[in-house]
Image (tube, helix red, strand yellow):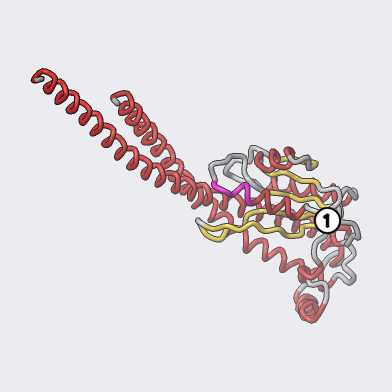
Amino acid sequence: MAQNLKDVRRRIQSVKNLRKITAAMKMVAASKLRRAQSRAEAARPYAEAVQGVLLRLAANAQGLRDPLLAERSGDATLAIVVASDRGLAGAYNANLNRAAAQKLAGTSRPQVVAVGRKVRDFFRHRGVRIAAEFTGLGDEIPFSLADRIAGEATRLFLDGQCDRVQLVYAQFVNPVLSRPVAVQLLPLAREELGGGGQGAARQRGAAEGEYIFEPDAEAVLAKLLPHYVSVLVYRALLEAKASEFGARMAAMDNATRNAGDLIDRLTLQSFRVRQAAITNEILEIVAGANALRG
C-alpha cells in the first residue's frame, strides 16, 4: 500500500508539471494569436481592393484572353494545402488534410503542394505525389513566401501538369472557430472578375468613365492576374496561421483543464490509498492484541 501511495503522489506531481507546461503554451498561443489575427484581418481589405481593380480591368478587357483564365476539360487536380509544421493544435491539421483528401478524391493525377510538415507527411504516407513542399514557416509569414508558392502552382498549371489548382486552408472566424475552405485558384473564375452579365456591364461603364489603361486593359490584366494569385495565397497563409494559433490555444486550454480534473481524481485516489493503509495497520494491531490476549 505504501508503494502504491508513493506511485500516486509521483503521478500527481507529474501531472502538475504537465499542467504548468500546457498553461504556458496556452498563454504563448494567445499572445501570437492576437498578432496573427490582426495581420489576417488587415490583409482582407487589400485582397478585396485588388479584386476591385481586376473587376474594372475585366470590364475593359474584352474577351478576357489570358492563360490563367483558360478552362480545361481534364480533371487533373493540384491542391495547395496549408496547415502547420507542428501538432498540439487539436483536430486542426486532421480536419484540413481530410478536407483536401476529399477534394482530391476521384480526380486523375492528384498532387499536392504541401505547406507545412503535417500536410507533407499525411499525403506522402498515402502515396499522393508531393509536387512541392514548403516547411519551417515560422510565425511571421512574408509575402515572398506566398509569391513562391503561387509561382510554383502557376508554373505547374501553365506547363499542363494539372488542369485546375485548388487552395485548401482554414478560414479564421474567431479565436475558437475556424473552418476548412477550398477555393479554385486556377483557372481564375471569370465570374469573380466580372466576366459577364449586368454586373459586368455596370462595372464596365464605371471603369470606362474613371480609368485610362496604358498600354491597354488586357496588358495590365496580364500583369495583375499573377499578383492577384499571390495575394489569394498570402491571404490564405495569414488566415491559416491565425486559425492554427486559435486551435492551439483552445487545445492547450482543454489540456490544462483536463489536467486539473485528473489531479483532483488522483488526489482523491491518494486519500483512499492512504486510508486503506491506515485501516490495514489498525487491523493488524487489533489482530496482534487479540492474539496476545488469547
Picture coordinates of residue 258, whole percent (x, y): 41, 45
* Magenta stretch holds residue 284: no
Question: Local crowd at mark 1 within 10 Å, few (<14), some, or many (≥20)?
Answer: many
Magenta segment boundaries in residue numbering: 90-95
Q: Tell me which residue sits at (34%, 38%) in the image.
A: 266
Q: Position of residue 53 (x, y in %)?
A: 74, 67
94 drawn magenta: yes
Instruction: Identify the residue at the far front of this view.
Output: 294
Q: Quadrant of residue 211?
A: bottom right
- Say above or below: 248 vs 269: below
Residue that badge 1 annotates: 164
Amino acid on which the number 1 mark rests in the picture = Arg
Residue reaching furthest to the left: 293
Which residue is drawn at the image coordinates 26% and 36% (left, top)?
271
Q: Give the main secondary structure, helix, strand or loop, of the magenta stretch.
A: helix
Relative image position of residue 240 (x, y in whole percent): 61, 51
Image quadrant in which you'd find residue 223: bottom right
Against 71, is 91 above or below?
A: above
